[in-house]
């Protein structure tokens, strides 16, 4: 075996010896047996650290000792080479078309026996190989191909023999195509998708394109099947209805088949009905599912089958912590069923075509798909100085204007479109991702629109282009943005107009020539760690503007590499930097709505309810209006309705209601009598799946609406009469009463110890708490918080006075400044502590921030450390899921109980988690004693076995060590979580940034 030409560094040599791209199908014999020779399974393999070790000076491939390796697989997942995670930066020097000589590669060999059929032809298919490969059949050079996520097909008829045959492939980790495959993902290599040989007759159907057209009211459809045959094949087509009824036949023909359908059943994501098209040449049969639908833009609004639709979507990579890029149908189906269970209706295949069967599955289950080409050249923006920033945006689109990449960029779109063109789910083509804009993208876009004008064309990266030439956006159908703010913000690199400003007519770019296309967020609400916190704010805008077609969450799944388990059976997941690689981007790949094992994050549960299919609003004392947000289905056909009435956290009434008939996008009024008008009262309307709804079981929750009927401040208990003794030293003020002794620290103004009926409730002194273990979404803020000293507060009590009130209660009044080493006080407070004869503690404080510190605080409150035996918690607030000011739509206001150990959300990179928003009271107990906190206003509470220091200092969840105590944090307010790890800054309404604020609360120890 010999390599005479280094194709892997020739950007004009993309596919040597391959067949032209075509639609994906697996042909069958006339009696419906597969015409496939499956080559998956055990191959012989040898890993080389370098291309120089694999090939000698004359280009001969060395013949080393081989070992078994499963195909498909990624060799890093099988113990060869090294995992690497990098987002923007190329993993190699930016020197196109060259790649390092020290280029890891793998030699694959597969032996198989074959009895050649008379006049049969044989086509070898590789559905995915990263990054490129040289191919030999029986020792003879067959060809070369690249584009990792596209099929490479070779006719190998003349090289096969009766008996044993051997296929050999040398796969390289990097090639010139690497510069166009800089997607944000773990970098893996190898033959990672299916390999097989198709045995075909001498003349056969090579390619076909199913097209449909409709009359104005969709009462009639014409179906045309454009044929490309090899040899003298004649094709007959038979069309079957979704129920299996044979409708019509057409042919035989070699160029075109035609069908007419009256009253067609239209395909959509809610009712994914498909016809079956059977194509036969007499020697071979091909079956294709056909979904009849039309997507179009009218008056800058997207319509499917004449209906204004919305995408409630996610971005999805092929990703698994064990198998890497190698994804089976069962793994993909697991993802898609989870999406259906969480109200997701659309998928963007970020940022490459998924496996060829993926869009068939999406068409069958009902998803709208943005089919994206295998293109991202983000790394050109870091080619100088290795960093990404405003000064280097001019290099961002370099590949898009580089003539050496034109053929490759057009090829990637062509291969994407040809392969998946017959799938109903694909309603939008995408030219790729984050590559800037230039002549090469324009050429690809023009080809796509000419070849398939029936679908919309998307590309987000055209905001950045070389300014010396006028760009052409004429082929792009959608105005696509990433992480656009819901309110206008000044971005460090460029001004980001808000979504409302777009619809209000703000100039977007003169090169759009006055066009204002439908608006789409191809990435939004970056779901990294504890987040996203702004899903509802975006959804309000999606519902507000007809021209806002929706968005795709970044992203579906945390990317990680499974590393086994700890001795105490905690899973070990590794991310960037855990493989001793350079460059790497840390845990930026841990940004999904689900964990690597597909356990939902609380962010997915939040998103599910934000995109619920039905919403309700209160219109009168006991009247409500339901709105159906489904696009094609009557609410009565898919949902059942029930309600629960709560007062002061307890259910006082519940029942079922008749779901009215509500047409798509329609409304209906309902009445619920006997609702309370006082206390903390709510009514919740609960939507569940009706019997017969596809995929979902009867009663599966679809979402809920909680309507606040009344809110009532609950006053703290009246101060009990009775004398409380006060004694003082230089360090503490002691307060003694019947069965209790409390000590207040004169240096902090907080309690050192609460001893109640001889039970010490604190394991260490209470402290002021203004810092939180940084969220991924805090990464641009946490450094400033540390500089300000929020993580190392040093309080100073300026004045303190203790005295008895007329009723005998102890009253301690103090003024305190909260500073830190190096810096001056950032908060000053006047605090009044009152302790009555029952041992109840009341606190009121008036606080003022020094606004010279700027920004906002992550939180403001106090932290208490209790014995670990205080292991059971109860609270009246938003639960059962963690909740924050901007992330509580998955939770309801009520009374919840939990073991403290279960109140931690185990993000794989530790961070603030598990808080509960808008609490009225919260308590912990060891079974005998109880400590309860309450406020006439609401507060946030966090009860955990992990300190924020532990969460801050550890890189991985499996490294965490629980404290030998229970930590209870009472916060006047916790700032929201947002999505600023990649999205806009936290909205001001969720920031703790007020200059003056007051906080009143009480602490009450008791025997349970």
Image (cartoon, rainbow, N blue to C red):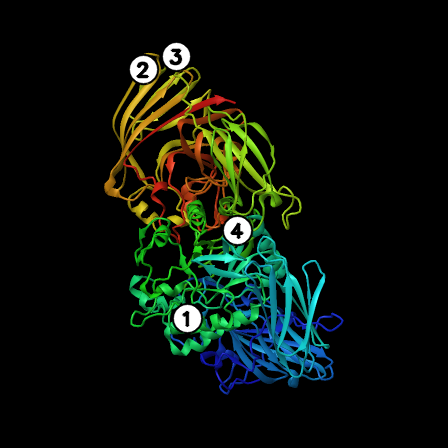
Q: Percent position (x, y) of residue 762?
A: 43, 29
Q: For residue 673, which quarter of the picture?
A: top right
* Residue contact between numbered discs 3 and 4, judged by CB atoms under 8 Å: no
Q: Percent position (x, y) of residue 953?
A: 41, 47
Query: Disc 3 designates what residue?
Result: 721
Q: Nearer the viewer, mark 2 or mark 3?
A: 3
Distance of mark 2 from mark 1, alpha carbons? 73 Å
Query: Disc 4 designates what residue?
Result: 594
> Which image quadrant: the N terminus?
bottom right
Q: For residue 735, which quarter of the picture?
A: top left
Whether 912 is drawn above or below 175: the answer is above
Distance of mark 4 from mark 2, alpha carbons? 56 Å
Q: Nearer the viewer, mark 3 or mark 4?
A: 4
Query: Disc 1 designates what residue?
Result: 92
Name the side, left or right, on which 471 lies relative to 915: left
Q: Nearer the viewer, mark 4 or mark 2?
A: 4
Question: Mark 1 or 4 closer to N-term?
Answer: 1
Which numbered disc covers residue 442?
none
* Residue contact between numbered discs 2 and 3, judged by CB atoms under 8 Å: no
Task: Characterize the local packing of mark 1: few (<14), some (14-19) or many (20 or more) Cα atoms within 10 angstroms.
Answer: some
Distance of mark 1 from mark 4, alpha carbons? 31 Å
Whether 724 is drawn above or below 85: the answer is above
Task: Characterize the local packing of mark 2: few (<14), some (14-19) or many (20 or more) Cα atoms within 10 angstroms.
Answer: some
Task: Characterize the local packing of mark 4: few (<14), some (14-19) or many (20 or more) Cα atoms within 10 angstroms.
Answer: many
Query: Disc 2 designates what residue?
Result: 804
Whether 211 is drawn above or below 608: the answer is below
Which is nearer the eye, 68 or 406?
406
**Secondary element at image label 4:** loop
Question: Mark 4 or 2 closer to N-term?
Answer: 4
């Amino acid at each position: 075996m010999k390599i005479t030409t280094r194709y892997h560094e020739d950007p004009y040599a993309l596919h040597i010896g391959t067949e032209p791209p075509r639609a994906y199908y697996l042909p069958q014999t006339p009696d419906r047996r597969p015409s496939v020779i499956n080559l998956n399974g055990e191959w012989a393999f040898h890993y080389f650290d370098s291309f120089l070790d694999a090939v000698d000076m004359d280009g001969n491939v060395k013949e080393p000792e081989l070992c078994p390796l499963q195909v498909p697989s990624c060799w890093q997942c099988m113990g060869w080479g090294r995992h690497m995670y990098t987002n923007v930066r190329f993993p190699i020097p930016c020197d196109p078309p060259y790649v390092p000589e020290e280029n890891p590669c793998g030699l694959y060999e597969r032996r198989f026996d074959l009895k050649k059929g008379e006049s049969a032809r044989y086509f070898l298919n590789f559905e995915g190989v990263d990054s490129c490969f040289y191919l030999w059949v029986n020792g003879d050079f067959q060809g070369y191909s690249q584009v990792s996520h596209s099929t490479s097909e070779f006719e190998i008829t003349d090289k096969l023999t009766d008996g044993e045959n051997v296929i050999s492939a040398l796969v390289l980790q990097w090639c010139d195509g690497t510069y166009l495959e800089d997607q944000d993902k773990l970098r893996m290599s190898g033959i990672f998708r299916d390999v097989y040989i198709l045995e075909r007759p001498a003349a056969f159907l090579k390619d076909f394109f199913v097209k449909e057209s409709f009359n104005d009211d969709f009462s009639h459809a014409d179906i045309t099947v454009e044929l490309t045959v090899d040899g003298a094949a004649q094709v007959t087509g038979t069309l079957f209805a979704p129920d299996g009824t044979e409708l019509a036949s057409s042919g035989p023909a070699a160029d075109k088949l035609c069908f007419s359908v009256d009253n067609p059943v239209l395909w959509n994501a809610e009712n994914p009905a498909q016809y079956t098209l059977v194509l036969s040449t007499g020697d071979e049969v091909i079956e294709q599912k056909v979904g009849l639908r039309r997507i179009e833009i009218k008056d800058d609004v997207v319509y499917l089958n004449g209906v204004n639709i919305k995408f409630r979507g996610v971005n999805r990579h092929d990703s698994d912590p064990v198998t890497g890029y190698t994804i089976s149908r069962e793994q993909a189906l697991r993802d898609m069923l989870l999406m259906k269970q969480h109200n997701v209706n659309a998928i963007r295949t970020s940022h490459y075509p998924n496996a060829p069967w993926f869009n068939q599955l999406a068409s069958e289950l009902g998803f709208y798909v943005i089919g994206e080409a295998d293109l991202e050249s983000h790394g050109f923006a870091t080619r100088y100085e290795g960093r990404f920033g405003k000064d280097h945006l001019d290099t961002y689109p370099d590949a898009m204007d580089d003539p050496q990449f034109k053929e490759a960029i057009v090829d990637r779109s062509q291969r994407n479109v040809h392969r998946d063109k017959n799938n109903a789910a694909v309603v939008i083509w995408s030219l790729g991702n984050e590559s800037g804009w230039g002549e090469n993208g324009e050429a690809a876009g023009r080809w796509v629109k000419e070849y398939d004008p029936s679908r919309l064309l998307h590309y987000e990266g055209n905001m950045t282009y070389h300014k010396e030439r006028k760009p052409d956006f004429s082929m792009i159908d959608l105005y696509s943005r990433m992480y656009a703010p819901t309110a206008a913000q000044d971005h460090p690199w460029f001004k980001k107009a808000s979504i409302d400003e777009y619809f209000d007519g703000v100039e977007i770019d003169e090169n759009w020539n006055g066009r204002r296309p439908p608006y789409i967020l191809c990435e939004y609400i970056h779901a990294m760690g504890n987040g996203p916190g702004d899903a509802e704010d975006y959804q309000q805008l999606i519902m507000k503007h007809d021209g806002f077609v929706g968005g795709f969450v970044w992203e579906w799944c945390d990317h990680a590499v499974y590393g086994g388990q700890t001795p105490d059976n905690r899973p070990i997941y590794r991310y960037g930097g855990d493989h001793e690689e350079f460059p790497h981007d840390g845990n930026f790949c841990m940004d999904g709505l689900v964990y690597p094992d597909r356990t939902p994050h609380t962010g997915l549960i939040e998103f599910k309810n934000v995109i619920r299919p039905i919403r309700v609003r209160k219109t009168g004392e006991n009247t409500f209006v339901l709105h159906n947000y489904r696009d094609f289905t009557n609410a009565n056909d898919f949902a059942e309705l029930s309600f629960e009435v709560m007062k002061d956290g307890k259910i006082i009434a519940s029942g079922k209601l008749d779901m009215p008939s509500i047409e798509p996008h329609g409304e209906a009024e309902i009445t619920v009598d006997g609702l309370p008008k006082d206390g903390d009262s709510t009514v919740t309307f609960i939507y569940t799946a009706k019997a017969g709804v596809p995929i979902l079981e009867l009663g599966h929750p679809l979402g809920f609406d909680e309507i606040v009927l009344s809110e009532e401040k609950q006053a703290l208990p009246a101060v009990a009469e009775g004398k409380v003794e006060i004694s003082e030293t230089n360090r503490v003020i002691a307060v003694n009463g019947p069965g209790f002794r409390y000590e207040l620290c004169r240096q902090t103004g907080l309690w050192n110890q609460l001893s109640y009926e001889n039970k010490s409730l604190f394991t260490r002194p209470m402290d002021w708490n203004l810092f939180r273990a940084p969220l991924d979404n805090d990464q641009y803020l946490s450094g400033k918080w540390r500089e300000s000293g929020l993580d190392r507060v040093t309080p100073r009590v300026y004045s303190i006075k203790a005295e008895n009130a007329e009723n005998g209660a102890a009253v301690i009044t103090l003024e305190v400044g909260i500073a830190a080493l190096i810096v001056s006080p950032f908060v000053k407070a006047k605090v009044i502590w009152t302790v009555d004869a029952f041992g109840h503690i009341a606190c009121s404080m008036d606080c003022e921030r020094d606004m010279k510190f700027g920004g906002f605080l992550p939180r403001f409150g106090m932290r208490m450390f209790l014995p670990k035996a205080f292991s059971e918690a109860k609270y009246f607030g938003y639960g059962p899921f963690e909740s924050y000011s901007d992330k509580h739509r998955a939770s309801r206001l009520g009374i919840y109980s939990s073991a403290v150990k279960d109140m931690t959300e185990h993000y794989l990179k530790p961070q603030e988690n598990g808080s509960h928003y808008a609490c009225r009271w919260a308590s912990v107990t060891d079974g005998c004693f109880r400590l309860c906190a309450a406020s006439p206003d609401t507060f946030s509470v966090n009860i955990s076995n992990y300190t924020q220091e532990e969460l801050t200092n550890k890189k991985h969840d499996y490294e965490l060590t629980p404290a030998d105590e229970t930590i209870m944090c009472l916060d006047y307010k916790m700032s929201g979580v947002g999505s600023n790890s990649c999205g806009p800054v936290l909205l001001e309404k969720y920031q703790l940034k007020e200059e003056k604020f007051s906080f009143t609360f009480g602490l009450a120890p008791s025997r349970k």
